[in-house]
Image: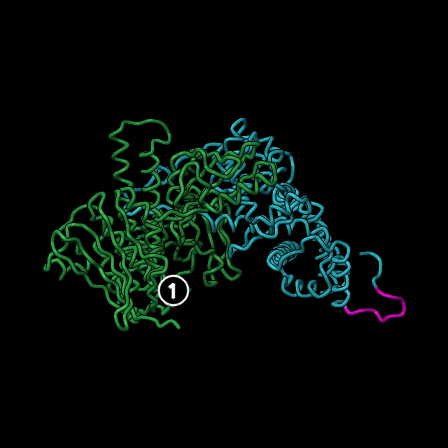
Chain colours: A green, B cyan
């Protein structure tokens, strides 16, 4: 549990008048700032509730920034001038959580025992199925290896010990217990602070274990680092679950250090921590891209055909990235509210493409420059063009800019080299295209075209 | 309901009709009170079934628990009122723990064996008295599940009167099933006495909690705060029950039905401040269909509406 308390203060009108850095950053990412109304809807509702009840309340708080969900606990103390906020247990977490299946979810295997041990492999539970051999007396608190005589696998290894080191699930641990051969499998257990607390699993009589189970178990020896092929549809989900959690923790911890929330540290150390957080966010972006890549390269991938308006989507993209542009003094000339370009395409995928194009434009534009976004219609195609005043791309580079992992020789940590590749794949999956028009020194113009939609 | 809900002269009702009318009468007596959800009903029923099977197995391993349960389901559980409290407390605790487990952050992932943490390195170390007491709490808690991880009630956790009543009810059923000969009755009577004595000598999670609390001494508050941080609710409940000198089930029910304002007094003996208690309040408030004391209070209703 993160014991640090993040404090904030709301005035009588509901504006955030003071806030520790993480809360302020969240407020800014939501498009507001200090002395502006609280822009985090869940927190705002809780503040209103506490004020209406005239008493302290403690509630879980859910918020999200552009990288991850944030889960924390907030205590709100209302008073005559507003309310004080104390936020604890601030955690960033992935959007999808790998859940550990309960024991009951597995097939009921005859002649089996179920067991649980703590992090030091001391048995805290041992039960048998009705037709299984009786469990030995006096198992309580004994070491796992006292109850089960561990035997090495064909490589001379002990899966349970390897799993203990990795704090991961294991399968296929051969043991002898109650004068019979058994196979031990277990899930790693963790508490709410992420601390490893032990294993829970089953011990199945060796001859009773179904062959299919063994095969499935072998394929799942290690959910994160097993030799799963890229074509496996499970792979994306697993890599996502395996990397997002640790990366989110690295970022959160590095940001904590970098923000010097627990007290001042040397400036260069704080800067290093900032670099770690930055690199972590980059890696998290890469995980997003890889998950996307895995998804769109699946045979038969097809985007939805929503009725969309490219003008509306372009304005939304500007709303989401406007702050980032402002930081560099970049002005974005967005389509006017009456500029419309009705089209067919999947709403969220088109927004994703536009965010990628606009994000690139902001990243590679000089400070205090301008970016234009225009929508248009050419025959049966509706188009949206993002133009910047960056260095531009020469003809050779234009030929490869949409290729996988192509970063045009850039070595900064700004991108994965997958964004434009994914964007074009998405455009084509929506029966559209993504093209570039540029010359060195004259900026770049990326145009997304989609099937136009006629509006009566 | 002791009084009849039927007019004189009407044929005796079927058990189903009778049960429904009783339920309706209860409903009419308190229409605004929240009812059991299907999940609460199913969990409590499953816990009762496993408890009856466990007690029956102790009394006489030859008893067919399925036949016993089938018959009791048809005719109603004897001493149902007495069982309701313990089964409901266990079911609510289970719901709470399940919810917490589902909301737990994903575990860290270590890639290499070198990344093994200090705790793992400590495998095989000799246990201190305090660690042994904590381990005993863990073991006592895990006895409160069946082999498939379903919630159950350990016989050692039952109060002696409930256990004895259950034994006698099952013995009566068994006697009616096999024969009424005096020898069989005497054997069952002996078994009831032996099992009652055996159960009285057993120590369940409440006893383990008391021992852990005693071993902690002045560090009990700190251990309770750590249990809260880990969402280790059984350890927290065991410590709180020991600090209050109450039973574990009693403490669980008190906590799970407490409104927010009632939480600080429950943890006052452990000297936990509001910040430490905040995760409990936050976790409880997310548990749907909780039978909260003071649920009719206007503050509670407005809070519910706001959610």
Q: Nearer the viewer, residue A45 or A205?
A: A45
Q: Quadrant of residue A214?
A: bottom left
Q: Which residues are magenta?
A: B6-14
Q: Quadrant of residue B31?
A: bottom right
Q: Nearer the viewer, residue A430 or A275?
A: A430
Q: Measured from the top left, where is residue A118 in percent x and y?
A: 44, 44
Q: Measured from the top left, where is residue A388 in percent x and y?
A: 21, 52
Q: Measured from the top left, where is residue A250 in percent x and y?
A: 32, 42
Residue found at x 35% / y 36%: A256
In the image, A222: left or right of B253?
left
Residue A429 visible? The answer is no
Residue A301 visible? The answer is yes
Q: Measured from the top left, where is residue A108 in percent x and y?
A: 48, 63
Residue found at x 42% / y 40%: A90
In the image, B165: left or right of B235?
right
Q: Which residue is mark 1?
A: A213
**Residue B7 belongs to the span the image colors magenta:** yes
**Residue A80 belongs to the span the image colors magenta:** no
């Amino acid at each position: 549990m993160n014991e640090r308390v993040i404090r904030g203060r709301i005035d009588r009108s509901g504006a955030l008048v003071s806030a520790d850095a993480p809360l302020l950053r969240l407020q800014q990412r939501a498009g507001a700032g200090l002395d502006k109304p609280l822009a985090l809807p869940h927190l705002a509702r809780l503040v209103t509730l506490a004020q209406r009840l005239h008493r302290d309340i403690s509630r879980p708080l859910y918020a999200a920034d552009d990288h991850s969900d944030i889960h924390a606990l907030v205590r709100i103390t209302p008073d005559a001038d507003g309310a004080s906020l104390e936020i604890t247990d601030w955690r960033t977490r992935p959007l999808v959580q790998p859940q550990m299946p309960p024991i009951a979810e597995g097939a009921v295997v005859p002649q089996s025992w179920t067991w649980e041990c703590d992090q030091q492999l001391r048995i805290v539970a041992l039960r048998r199925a009705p037709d299984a051999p009786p469990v030995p007396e006096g198992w309580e608190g004994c070491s796992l290896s006292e109850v089960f005589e561990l035997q090495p696998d064909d490589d001379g290894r002990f899966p349970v010990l390897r799993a203990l080191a990795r704090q991961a699930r294991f399968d296929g641990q051969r043991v002898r217990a109650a004068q019979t051969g058994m196979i031990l499998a277990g899930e790693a257990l963790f508490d709410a602070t992420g601390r490893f607390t032990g294993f829970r699993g089953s011990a199945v009589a060796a001859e009773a274990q179904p062959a299919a189970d063994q095969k499935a178990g072998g394929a799942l020896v290690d959910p994160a680092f097993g030799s799963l092929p890229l074509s496996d549809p499970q792979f994306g989900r697993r890599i996502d679950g395996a990397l997002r959690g640790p990366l989110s923790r690295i970022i959160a911890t590095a940001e904590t250090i970098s923000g010097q929330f627990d007290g001042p540290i040397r400036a260069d150390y704080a800067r290093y921590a900032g670099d770690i957080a930055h690199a972590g966010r980059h890696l998290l972006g890469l995980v997003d891209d890889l998950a996307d890549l895995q998804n769109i390269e699946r045979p038969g991938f097809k985007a939805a055909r929503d009725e969309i308006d490219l003008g509306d989507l372009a304005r939304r993209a500007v709303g989401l990235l406007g702050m980032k542009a402002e930081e560099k003094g970049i002005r974005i000339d967005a389509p006017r509210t009456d500029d419309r370009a009705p089209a067919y395409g999947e709403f969220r995928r088109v927004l994703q493409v536009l965010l990628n194009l606009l994000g690139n434009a902001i990243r590679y534009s000089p400070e205090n420059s301008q970016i234009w976004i225009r929508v248009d219609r050419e025959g049966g195609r509706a188009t949206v063009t993002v133009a910047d005043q960056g260095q531009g791309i020469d003809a050779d580079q234009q030929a490869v800019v949409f290729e996988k992992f192509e970063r045009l020789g850039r070595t900064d940590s700004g991108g994965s080299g997958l964004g434009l590749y994914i964007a074009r794949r998405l455009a084509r999956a929506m029966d559209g295209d993504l093209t570039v028009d540029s010359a060195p020194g004259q900026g770049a113009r990326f145009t997304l075209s989609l099937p136009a939609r006629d509006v009566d | 309901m002791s009084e009849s809900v039927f007019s004189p002269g009407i044929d005796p009702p079927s058990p189903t009709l009778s049960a429904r009318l009783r339920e309706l009468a209860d409903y009419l007596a308190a229409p605004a009170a929240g009812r059991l959800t299907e999940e609460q009903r199913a969990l409590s029923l499953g816990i009762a079934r496993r408890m009856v099977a466990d007690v029956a197995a102790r009394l006489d391993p030859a008893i067919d628990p399925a036949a016993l349960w089938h018959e009791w389901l048809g005719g109603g559980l004897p001493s149902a009122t007495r069982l309701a409290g313990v089964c409901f407390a266990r079911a609510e605790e289970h719901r709470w723990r399940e919810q917490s487990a589902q909301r737990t952050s994903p575990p860290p992932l270590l890639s290499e064996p070198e990344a093994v943490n200090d705790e793992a390195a400590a495998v095989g170390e000799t246990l201190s008295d305090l660690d042994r007491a904590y381990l005993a709490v863990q073991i006592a808690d895990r006895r409160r599940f069946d082999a498939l991880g379903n919630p159950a009630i350990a016989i050692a956790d039952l109060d002696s009167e409930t256990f004895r009543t259950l034994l006698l009810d099952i013995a009566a059923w068994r006697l009616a099933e096999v024969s009424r000969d005096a020898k069989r009755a005497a054997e069952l009577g002996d078994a009831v006495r032996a099992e009652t004595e055996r159960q009285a000598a057993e120590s369940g999670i409440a006893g383990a909690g008391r021992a852990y609390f005693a071993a902690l001494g002045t560090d009990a508050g700190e251990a309770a705060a750590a249990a809260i941080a880990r969402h280790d609710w059984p350890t927290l409940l065991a410590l709180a029950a020991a600090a209050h000198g109450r039973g574990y089930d009693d403490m669980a029910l008190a906590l799970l039905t407490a409104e927010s304002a009632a939480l600080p007094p429950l943890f006052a003996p452990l000297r936990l401040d509001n910040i430490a208690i905040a995760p409990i309040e936050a976790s409880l408030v997310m548990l749907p269909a909780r039978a909260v004391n003071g649920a009719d209070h206007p503050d509670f209703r407005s809070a519910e509406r706001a959610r």
